[in-house]
Protein backbone atom coordinates (compact mmCIF):
# COMPACT_ATOMS: atom_id res chain seq x y z
CA UNK A 1 0.00 0.00 0.00
CA UNK A 2 1.46 3.34 -1.03
CA UNK A 3 0.74 6.22 1.32
CA UNK A 4 -0.04 9.28 -0.75
CA UNK A 5 -1.59 12.66 -0.08
CA UNK A 6 -4.99 11.28 -1.14
CA UNK A 7 -4.55 7.84 0.35
CA UNK A 8 -8.30 7.21 0.83
CA UNK A 9 -8.30 6.56 4.56
CA UNK A 10 -11.55 4.80 5.41
CA UNK A 11 -11.35 4.71 9.22
CA UNK A 12 -9.37 6.89 11.61
CA UNK A 13 -8.07 4.56 14.29
CA UNK A 14 -5.18 4.78 16.72
CA UNK A 15 -3.05 1.64 16.31
CA UNK A 16 -2.16 1.22 20.00
CA UNK A 17 -4.88 1.11 22.63
CA UNK A 18 -4.24 2.99 25.88
CA UNK A 19 -2.74 0.69 28.48
CA UNK A 20 -4.61 0.56 31.80
CA UNK A 21 -2.79 1.10 35.09
CA UNK A 22 -3.10 -2.60 36.00
CA UNK A 23 -1.75 -3.66 32.62
CA UNK A 24 1.09 -1.17 32.96
CA UNK A 25 2.19 -3.09 36.04
CA UNK A 26 1.76 -6.45 34.34
CA UNK A 27 3.33 -5.30 31.07
CA UNK A 28 6.33 -3.95 32.94
CA UNK A 29 7.46 -7.52 33.26
CA UNK A 30 6.03 -9.11 30.12
CA UNK A 31 5.10 -6.62 27.37
CA UNK A 32 7.28 -3.58 27.85
CA UNK A 33 7.32 -2.99 24.10
CA UNK A 34 3.56 -2.36 24.08
CA UNK A 35 4.07 0.44 26.60
CA UNK A 36 6.84 1.90 24.49
CA UNK A 37 4.68 1.68 21.38
CA UNK A 38 1.84 3.57 23.09
CA UNK A 39 4.24 6.26 24.31
CA UNK A 40 5.66 6.57 20.81
CA UNK A 41 2.13 6.94 19.45
CA UNK A 42 1.57 9.79 21.93
CA UNK A 43 4.76 11.44 20.67
CA UNK A 44 3.45 11.24 17.09
CA UNK A 45 0.18 12.81 18.21
CA UNK A 46 1.93 15.53 20.22
CA UNK A 47 3.98 16.43 17.17
CA UNK A 48 0.77 16.54 15.10
CA UNK A 49 -1.12 18.70 17.63
CA UNK A 50 1.69 21.17 18.32
CA UNK A 51 3.25 21.31 14.87
CA UNK A 52 6.65 20.73 16.42
CA UNK A 53 9.21 18.45 14.82
CA UNK A 54 9.18 14.92 16.17
CA UNK A 55 12.20 13.91 18.21
CA UNK A 56 12.14 10.20 19.04
CA UNK A 57 14.36 9.20 22.00
CA UNK A 58 16.52 6.10 21.56
CA UNK A 59 14.50 4.22 24.15
CA UNK A 60 11.56 4.01 21.74
CA UNK A 61 12.93 1.20 19.63
CA UNK A 62 10.15 -1.13 18.44
CA UNK A 63 11.31 -4.54 17.25
CA UNK A 64 7.83 -5.93 16.49
CA UNK A 65 7.45 -5.44 12.73
CA UNK A 66 3.65 -5.31 12.78
CA UNK A 67 3.52 -2.64 15.50
CA UNK A 68 6.27 -0.70 13.80
CA UNK A 69 4.43 -0.85 10.47
CA UNK A 70 1.15 0.28 12.06
CA UNK A 71 2.82 3.27 13.72
CA UNK A 72 4.43 4.33 10.43
CA UNK A 73 1.04 4.11 8.72
CA UNK A 74 -0.50 6.16 11.55
CA UNK A 75 2.17 8.81 11.13
CA UNK A 76 1.31 8.95 7.43
CA UNK A 77 -2.40 9.32 8.23
CA UNK A 78 -1.69 12.21 10.60
CA UNK A 79 0.33 13.75 7.78
CA UNK A 80 -2.64 13.59 5.41
CA UNK A 81 -4.78 15.45 7.96
CA UNK A 82 -2.20 18.22 7.72
CA UNK A 83 -2.48 17.96 3.92
CA UNK A 84 1.18 17.01 3.68
CA UNK A 85 2.80 14.86 1.03
CA UNK A 86 4.33 11.66 2.31
CA UNK A 87 7.05 9.41 0.96
CA UNK A 88 6.21 6.58 -1.43
CA UNK A 89 7.11 3.81 0.99
CA UNK A 90 5.19 0.57 0.67
CA UNK A 91 3.42 -0.89 3.65
CA UNK A 92 2.18 -4.44 3.87
CA UNK A 93 -1.42 -4.86 4.95
CA UNK A 94 -0.47 -7.49 7.51
CA UNK A 95 -2.45 -6.28 10.53
CA UNK A 96 -6.05 -5.74 11.57
CA UNK A 97 -5.26 -2.04 11.98
CA UNK A 98 -3.85 -1.58 8.47
CA UNK A 99 -6.65 -3.55 6.85
CA UNK A 100 -9.31 -1.51 8.67
CA UNK A 101 -7.96 2.00 8.08
CA UNK A 102 -7.62 1.33 4.36
CA UNK A 103 -11.02 -0.36 4.01
CA UNK A 104 -9.81 -3.87 3.22
CA UNK A 105 -11.81 -4.93 6.28
CA UNK A 106 -14.71 -3.13 7.98
CA UNK A 107 -14.78 -1.29 11.28
CA UNK A 108 -17.61 -3.58 12.33
CA UNK A 109 -15.38 -6.65 11.88
CA UNK A 110 -12.52 -4.90 13.65
CA UNK A 111 -14.75 -4.29 16.69
CA UNK A 112 -16.00 -7.88 16.70
CA UNK A 113 -12.51 -9.37 16.53
CA UNK A 114 -11.45 -7.57 19.69
CA UNK A 115 -14.84 -7.59 21.45
CA UNK A 116 -15.02 -3.79 21.23
CA UNK A 117 -18.62 -3.44 20.02
CA UNK A 118 -20.43 -2.84 23.33
CA UNK A 119 -17.87 -0.40 24.70
CA UNK A 120 -17.81 1.45 21.40
CA UNK A 121 -21.57 1.95 21.42
CA UNK A 122 -21.46 3.26 25.00
CA UNK A 123 -18.62 5.58 24.01
CA UNK A 124 -20.63 6.83 21.03
CA UNK A 125 -23.50 7.73 23.37
CA UNK A 126 -21.10 9.69 25.59
CA UNK A 127 -19.55 11.40 22.56
CA UNK A 128 -23.02 12.42 21.32
CA UNK A 129 -23.74 13.81 24.78
CA UNK A 130 -20.62 15.95 24.52
CA UNK A 131 -21.69 17.23 21.09
CA UNK A 132 -25.15 18.00 22.48
CA UNK A 133 -23.63 20.11 25.27
CA UNK A 134 -21.70 22.10 22.66
CA UNK A 135 -24.88 22.51 20.63
CA UNK A 136 -26.68 23.87 23.73
CA UNK A 137 -23.80 26.29 24.33
CA UNK A 138 -22.90 24.40 27.51
CA UNK A 139 -19.31 23.68 26.53
CA UNK A 140 -18.26 23.66 30.18
CA UNK A 141 -20.12 20.34 30.48
CA UNK A 142 -18.83 18.84 27.22
CA UNK A 143 -15.41 17.66 28.40
CA UNK A 144 -16.51 15.12 31.02
CA UNK A 145 -18.54 12.86 28.67
CA UNK A 146 -15.85 13.30 25.99
CA UNK A 147 -13.18 12.01 28.37
CA UNK A 148 -15.38 9.08 29.41
CA UNK A 149 -15.90 8.14 25.75
CA UNK A 150 -12.13 8.15 25.19
CA UNK A 151 -11.47 6.15 28.34
CA UNK A 152 -13.79 3.38 27.17
CA UNK A 153 -12.60 3.40 23.55
CA UNK A 154 -9.10 4.84 23.42
CA UNK A 155 -8.34 3.32 19.99
CA UNK A 156 -10.87 5.47 18.12
CA UNK A 157 -9.25 8.67 16.81
CA UNK A 158 -12.44 10.72 16.87
CA UNK A 159 -12.78 10.39 20.64
CA UNK A 160 -9.13 11.27 21.21
CA UNK A 161 -9.08 14.37 19.00
CA UNK A 162 -12.47 15.52 20.28
CA UNK A 163 -11.12 15.62 23.84
CA UNK A 164 -8.16 17.73 22.73
CA UNK A 165 -10.47 20.16 20.92
CA UNK A 166 -13.00 20.46 23.77
CA UNK A 167 -10.17 21.29 26.19
CA UNK A 168 -9.42 24.38 24.08
CA UNK A 169 -13.10 25.34 23.72
CA UNK A 170 -13.62 24.98 27.46
CA UNK A 171 -10.57 27.12 28.24
CA UNK A 172 -11.77 29.86 25.87
CA UNK A 173 -15.19 29.82 27.50
CA UNK A 174 -13.70 29.79 30.99
CA UNK A 175 -11.72 33.00 30.35
CA UNK A 176 -14.74 34.64 28.73
CA UNK A 177 -16.86 33.81 31.78
CA UNK A 178 -14.40 35.77 33.92
CA UNK A 179 -14.84 38.76 31.63
CA UNK A 180 -18.62 38.51 31.75
CA UNK A 181 -18.54 38.79 35.55
CA UNK A 182 -16.79 42.21 35.33
CA UNK A 183 -16.54 42.41 39.14
CA UNK A 184 -12.81 41.71 39.14
CA UNK A 185 -11.78 42.73 35.64
CA UNK A 186 -12.95 46.36 35.74
CA UNK A 187 -9.84 47.95 34.22
CA UNK A 188 -9.82 48.38 30.46
CA UNK A 189 -6.21 47.26 29.94
CA UNK A 190 -6.83 44.14 32.02
CA UNK A 191 -9.89 43.26 29.95
CA UNK A 192 -7.96 43.74 26.71
CA UNK A 193 -5.34 41.31 28.01
CA UNK A 194 -8.02 38.71 28.72
CA UNK A 195 -9.56 39.15 25.27
CA UNK A 196 -6.09 38.40 23.94
CA UNK A 197 -5.93 35.21 26.02
CA UNK A 198 -9.30 34.12 24.66
CA UNK A 199 -8.15 34.79 21.11
CA UNK A 200 -4.99 32.72 21.63
CA UNK A 201 -7.02 29.72 22.84
CA UNK A 202 -9.58 30.19 20.11
CA UNK A 203 -6.92 30.35 17.39
CA UNK A 204 -5.43 27.09 18.65
CA UNK A 205 -8.90 25.52 18.61
CA UNK A 206 -9.54 26.77 15.05
CA UNK A 207 -6.25 25.32 13.81
CA UNK A 208 -6.91 21.96 15.46
CA UNK A 209 -10.52 21.80 14.27
CA UNK A 210 -9.47 22.54 10.71
CA UNK A 211 -7.01 19.63 10.89
CA UNK A 212 -9.39 17.10 12.39
CA UNK A 213 -12.60 18.02 10.56
CA UNK A 214 -12.28 14.90 8.29
CA UNK A 215 -12.49 12.72 11.41
CA UNK A 216 -15.93 14.09 12.36
CA UNK A 217 -19.26 13.32 10.77
CA UNK A 218 -20.59 16.38 8.92
CA UNK A 219 -23.49 16.91 11.33
CA UNK A 220 -21.12 17.03 14.30
CA UNK A 221 -18.61 19.33 12.65
CA UNK A 222 -21.48 21.70 11.80
CA UNK A 223 -22.39 21.89 15.50
CA UNK A 224 -18.82 22.86 16.34
CA UNK A 225 -18.68 25.44 13.53
CA UNK A 226 -21.86 27.02 14.86
CA UNK A 227 -20.37 27.13 18.37
CA UNK A 228 -17.34 29.01 17.03
CA UNK A 229 -19.63 31.51 15.26
CA UNK A 230 -21.81 32.05 18.34
CA UNK A 231 -18.84 32.37 20.66
CA UNK A 232 -17.13 34.92 18.40
CA UNK A 233 -20.39 36.89 18.28
CA UNK A 234 -20.62 36.87 22.09
CA UNK A 235 -17.04 38.18 22.31
CA UNK A 236 -17.81 41.00 19.86
CA UNK A 237 -20.91 41.96 21.83
CA UNK A 238 -18.88 42.04 25.04
CA UNK A 239 -16.19 44.22 23.44
CA UNK A 240 -18.84 46.65 22.17
CA UNK A 241 -20.27 46.94 25.68
CA UNK A 242 -16.79 47.79 26.94
CA UNK A 243 -16.55 50.40 24.20
CA UNK A 244 -19.67 52.10 25.59
CA UNK A 245 -18.70 51.67 29.24
CA UNK A 246 -15.14 53.03 29.24
CA UNK A 247 -14.01 56.55 28.50
CA UNK A 248 -11.55 55.72 25.72
CA UNK A 249 -8.88 57.81 24.06
CA UNK A 250 -7.99 57.41 20.37
CA UNK A 251 -5.41 54.70 21.09
CA UNK A 252 -7.89 52.66 23.13
CA UNK A 253 -10.54 53.07 20.42
CA UNK A 254 -8.10 51.61 17.89
CA UNK A 255 -7.47 48.67 20.22
CA UNK A 256 -11.22 48.06 20.44
CA UNK A 257 -11.60 48.24 16.66
CA UNK A 258 -8.81 45.71 16.15
CA UNK A 259 -10.30 43.38 18.77
CA UNK A 260 -13.68 43.45 17.05
CA UNK A 261 -12.02 42.69 13.71
CA UNK A 262 -10.05 39.77 15.20
CA UNK A 263 -13.22 38.11 16.53
CA UNK A 264 -15.22 38.84 13.37
CA UNK A 265 -13.00 36.91 10.94
Image (tube, helix red, strand yellow):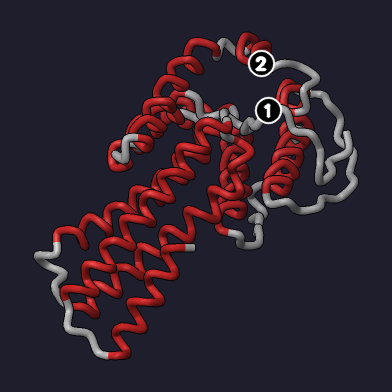
The extreme bottom residue here reads 250
Residue 96 appears anywhere in the view: yes
Residue 49 point in image, percent of width and height: 56, 53
Q: How many marks?
A: 2
Question: Which secondary structure, mark 1?
Answer: loop
Location of the N terminus by quadrant is top right
Q: Residue at x 63, y 35 (%)?
A: 33
- Mark 1 vs mark 2: in front: 1
Above or below, comparing residue 190 to residue 210 in the picture: below
Q: Residue at x 30, y 90 (%)?
A: 250
Badge 1 vs badge 2, beta-carbon distance below 8 Å: yes
Q: Residue at x 37, y 35 (%)?
A: 135
Residue 225 shown left or right of residue 84 in the figure: left
Residue 164 appears anywhere in the view: no
Question: Which secondary structure, mark 2?
Answer: helix
Q: Which class describes the residues within 10 Å of circle 2: few (<14), some (14-19), or many (20+)? A: some
Residue 117 point in image, percent of width and height: 54, 11
Q: Quadrant of residue 163?
A: top left
Above or below, comparing residue 71 to residue 145 in the picture: below
Residue for badge 2: 110
Residue for badge 1: 11
Amino acid sequence: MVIKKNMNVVEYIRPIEKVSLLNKILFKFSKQEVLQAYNLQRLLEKSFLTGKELNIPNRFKISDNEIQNDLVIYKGILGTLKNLKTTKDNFALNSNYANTVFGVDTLSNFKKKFNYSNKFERSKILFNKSIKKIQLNQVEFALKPAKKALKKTSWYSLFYFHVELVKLLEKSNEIFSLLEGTLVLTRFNKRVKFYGLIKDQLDKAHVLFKLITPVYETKDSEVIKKWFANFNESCVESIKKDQEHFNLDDEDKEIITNLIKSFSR
